[in-house]
Image (cartoon, rainbow, N blue to C red):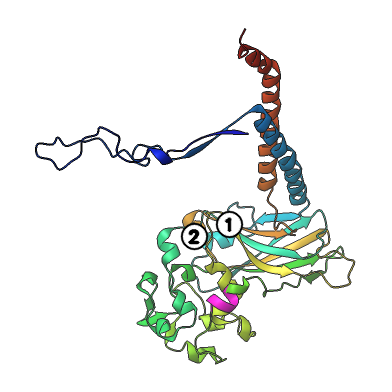
Amino acid sequence: MMASSYNAKDEDGIQPGSVGSGGPGAVKNRKPDNTAFKQQRLPAWQPILTAGTVLPAFFTIGLIFIPIGIGLFVTSNNIKEFEIDYTGVDKSSPCFHCSQNYSWNSTSACTCSVPFTLETSFESNVFMYYGLSNFYQNHRRYVKSRDDSQLNGDQSSLLNPSKECEPYRKSDEKTIAPCGAIANSLFNDTLELFHIHPNGNRTAIHLVKTGIAWWTDKHVKFRNPGGNNKNLSVAFQDTSKPVNWRKPVYELDPTDPDNNGFINEDFIVWMRTAALPTFRKLFRIIQKKKDSKTPTLQSGNYTLEVTYNYPVRSFDGRKRMILSTISWMGGKNPFLGIAYMTVGSVCFFLGVVLLIIHHKYGNRNNNADIPN
């Protein structure tokens, strides 16, 4: 690769014959100073692209990106995923009566059962997600509507949270804990999974509710007030529950002190807001039994038992449950593989086109430069 350079080191200063300033009757010169910077004569380097440098670059990028893209795409396709919508929009849906009748003001829970069939077995650990559509967690005021100091267990912020939490800062003249719109809209549907045997009996699938949040969130960003005080009802005694919640924060998981209050993992997962209006969040983990050769989820009939606590009709939202395995690259996402293959193919194609042009016209240009 050739390059052109220019060094203006010796050209700085005043040119001979120039008129200085300061004399009586001197004419003011509007011309910029004769320096390399002001006269744009600084040293420069500019690559000269030739066929010997461009063509190998295009072919190299193509030969590297295409195999990587194929590998990513195949890996993504090997991930098994099943998704079912249980919003209850259609009248034939088992959850239709819940979607039509349930609201935040309902005093009794509504339950429905959604049957489905897995065509293939799921090996290894299976991750269970809930998904929402048309829910804009990325709205500026929604994202700011929280108090991180309160969520970190600070006692003063617990009783006097940030004004960013308005209008979910106080209720019944008591401070709301946790405050803000994000916490107030916590997803609270209860999902249970059952395997239906050929004889009609059903077996509950064990769903693990811990280990679903980021380690830094669980152990650094979210802490309960009161330090080592295990009696959270005392720590939160001067606070009120969020408006849309059925129970206070210290009753999210009373059977497990390490998963209750602000460090409840369902709550922590929800507080990490999504960037897009259609998103999914990890809900439970179905762990594969050790030293077991049977699949984690066998192919066959299943039933999803839903306690319908989260209304979505007000914003035309949809709710769904997703079962998925993962790989070394995470969940199912074919976009990255397609992007690599597309870029690699375009570069390889451009390399072939430029090679043909160079082979056809390159010699003609060289001959034209030779003097007679």
Task: Please tell me whether mark 2 sits on a helix, a strand or a loop.
Answer: loop
Q: Position of residue 270 (x, y in %)?
A: 55, 68
Left or right of 142 on screen, residue 323 = right
Q: Residue at x 43, y 63 (%)?
A: 142
Dominant secondary-structure state across the stretch colored magenta: helix
Tell me the number on the disc at residue 137: 2
In the image shown, does 45 or 96 lie closer to the viewer? 45
Q: Position of residue 208 (x, y in %)?
A: 71, 73
Q: Residue at x 77, y 56 (%)?
A: 117
Q: Is residue 358 visible?
A: yes
Report the span colored magenta: 217-222
Q: Is 20 inside the magenta-drawn segment?
A: no
Q: Is residue 81 above or below residue 235?
A: above
Q: Viewer-proximal residue, 66 or 218? A: 66
Which residue: 49% across, 67% down? 185
Residue placed at 65% from the left, 70% from the top?
A: 212
* Above or below, 155 relative to 120: below
Instruction: Check disc 1 and give the amino acid type.
Output: Phe
Residues under numbered marks 1 and 2 in contact, where contact means CB atoms less than 8 Å apart? yes
Q: Are there few (<14), some (14-19), or many (20+) residues within 10 Å of tag 1?
A: some
In magenta segment, residue 220: yes
Disc 1 or 2, which lies upstream in sequence? 2
Image quadrant where residue 195 sits: bottom right
Q: Which residue is labeled 1 in the image?
A: 279
Quadrant location, the C terminus? top right
Q: Secondary structure at mark 1?
A: strand
Comparing 91 with 103, the one in front is 103
- Residue 218: x %, y % from top left: 59, 76
Residue at the extreme left? 24
Decide if residue 118 is on the left or right side of residue 346: right
Of 21 and 365, nearer the camera is: 21
**Spatial CA span between label 1 and label 2:** 9 Å
